[in-house]
Amino acid sequence: MSGSPATRRVTAADIAREVGVSRATVGFVMNATPGQTISAGTRDRVFAAARRLGYRPHLAAQALARGRTRIILLVLPDWPMEYSMSRHVDEASNFLDEAGYSLVTMTSHRGGNARPLWETLQPDVVMGMLHFDQDTFDDIRAAGVTAIIPDPSSAAAEPEAPVSAGPRLQVEHLLERGRRNLVYATSADPRLESLTSSRYALAAATVAEHDAGVLPEHAVNPENVAELVLRWAREGVDAVVAYNDDIAALVTGAAIRQGIEIPRQLAVIGHDDAPISRIFVPSITTVHLDDVGLGRYFADLALSAANGSPAPNAESSPQLSLTVRETT
Amino acid sequence: MSGSPATRRVTAADIAREVGVSRATVGFVMNATPGQTISAGTRDRVFAAARRLGYRPHLAAQALARGRTRIILLVLPDWPMEYSMSRHVDEASNFLDEAGYSLVTMTSHRGGNARPLWETLQPDVVMGMLHFDQDTFDDIRAAGVTAIIPDPSSAAAEPEAPVSAGPRLQVEHLLERGRRNLVYATSADPRLESLTSSRYALAAATVAEHDAGVLPEHAVNPENVAELVLRWAREGVDAVVAYNDDIAALVTGAAIRQGIEIPRQLAVIGHDDAPISRIFVPSITTVHLDDVGLGRYFADLALSAANGSPAPNAESSPQLSLTVRETT
DNA sequence: GTGGCTGGCTTGCGCGCGCTAGCGCCGCCC
DNA sequence: GGGCGGCGCTAGCGCGCGCAAGCCAGCCAC
């Protein structure tokens, strides 16, 4: 049906022949090559023929010729955060697409033995949500990738920067609610270490700013959460700042099972506004992220690394906001 | 430090020069080209030089020359199922890597205006979890992809096939628990339509087999779930088969809020064994998927489409099992 | 001795595209 | 009238690799 099955692909040469110009001209038109002047008539005829024949530039050939793939690889952590990311990622890929780049995401393999995509795709930029450990970083460089974000050697590019207001919002919300005895519940997952530690540090700093004592940090998991919740109750803890909504749900669930009243005895606040925060009973107060803003921020960050366009400033784009629900 | 910064990439020609053979010989060695005999000595010297120089074949050049990218694109639905998928995907990418293919995943854009990856990556195979709608299917074909899974014109390849035992397990578990008045709670998300409808059909068939009447289907969302749950209570419904764990959680949460006792008055069973099923209070009985088995199945499916290797039979690989928790 | 054959290699083309060097033409200015 | 510069285009190389064709030495059969 749809076109002869074994049809050869349409190349720039086909267009050139069709229009009656050289192949170079077609290339100049398609790329709007700077420094080349093409008459409007020729340009239109080339575009028309391209559309008519269904021309699609061969990406591999382009990559080979120009030495850049125009692929940006986003490395996501393999943890629920993934979901909250997907919205931003979608936004980012729109922006990047407009700039002629493709966004490919991969989930960081847990000791998976498959060759990572930065080897096989040879992206122009590899961007991670978390800091890469040194081995991974070297591995990416060895694969020929020159632009890596975040790059420890340049303090500028920080994917996590715009989210740094989140922990502040969490803590201030609880303090405003009159809570005084806060603890921080974090994930024990080592893969998230750089994220969890940075969020914790920000939360702890906010607590200190408000002269609300110190903020103890506890790694929470399904096994120890019941015990922790009881201990907190004994110690007079009245609010939990959770690293994300999953941790918040875990804590909230355990508290309920132990007969602790939420939020009267214990307030809990999550982060990311993941679906679970809305579905959970009771529903969980959380920090909502600005998808579009974050997406644009990521895209700008990647583009600046890819072609030296100006780097975005963290403050400009994304706005975080509080979504107050039943746990506070 | 790590190598001179602006170093040119190592090509097969460099190796040839180093070893003192022609470039073609290097190519034959690297690809173990069938029909070409290379002496063991030469072969070893080529491999040694390749390792010594840090040779990495240029993927774009390979793709250009052989006309195939060895990329397999997996299109995931943009819905929580994503999480339960990630384990299988990881498995699949290991298997595919061994076969020399790279697995790239993308999330199906909700009207996103970025060009989809099947255009820009030009994968050898595009594989979806759900059936593609006709427009998308045509779009993928137009991008030059010949192998698409599932392909409506060939009934063989069905990614969802191995999971077809899930709804059966759900229903039989509830019947064994003595429940007689079941309803099916599904997602209203149109993107999941082909999945939800197939799971529902299987559940309904199982109910019919056991002479347990008919299985009404209800699309559930946060707005209508409270009302639905009340109605079910009035109508004597004693068990809910949920499309997945999120739906199950939604139903369970609504029931609790309405004072319905779980599982005494109403049993709920989910599907996928997503994290929420464990975290939720009460924890949710669900169908656990076999990550490794499913991963291998997907990989085989993709490989069979890529190079005509034998297609896997759905029965062979993956095993589903029941994870019984508090909601039944 | 000669022809055929096979193992082990080389020569060289083509994949589709980007882009530099250059060429002819026209209009402008002195 | 001649020089000159810019516009609009073409010829052709190179990106790195796969692979068809061919070439040569050595060996065996006759």
Image: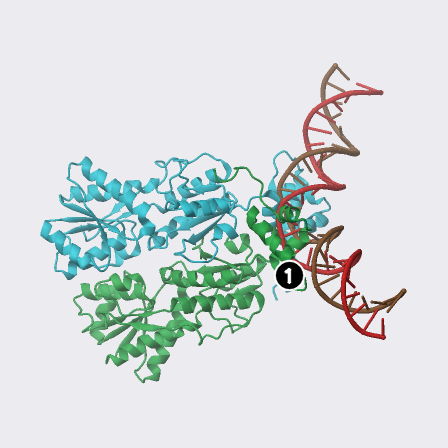
Chain colours: A cyan, B green, C brown, D red
Does any portion of residue B58 appear in the rendered image?
Answer: no
Count numbered badges in the picture: 1
Residue A212 vertical placement versus B147 (above, below): above
Residue B242 vertical placement versus A188 (above, below): below
User: Counting other residues with Cα less than 10 Å from the Cα at mark 1, is it few (<14), some (14-19), or many (20 or more)?
Assistant: few
Q: Amino acid at mark 1?
A: Thr
B34 left or right of B246 in image = right
**Can you tell which quarter of the image residue B315 is in?**
bottom left
Q: Nearer the viewer, residue D9 or A262?
A: A262
Residue indicated by mark 1: B33
Chain letter for mark 1: B
Q: Nearer the viewer, residue A302 or A293?
A: A302
Residue at figure coordinates x 16%, y 48% from the top left: A239
Residue at figure coordinates x 27%, y 51% from the top left: A244
**Can you tell which quarter of the image residue B111 is in?**
bottom left
Q: Position of residue B46 (x, y in %)?
A: 61, 53
A193 left or right of A173 in image = right
Residue at figure coordinates x 59%, y 45% from the top left: B10
User: Of helix, strand and loop, which one carries label 1?
Assistant: loop
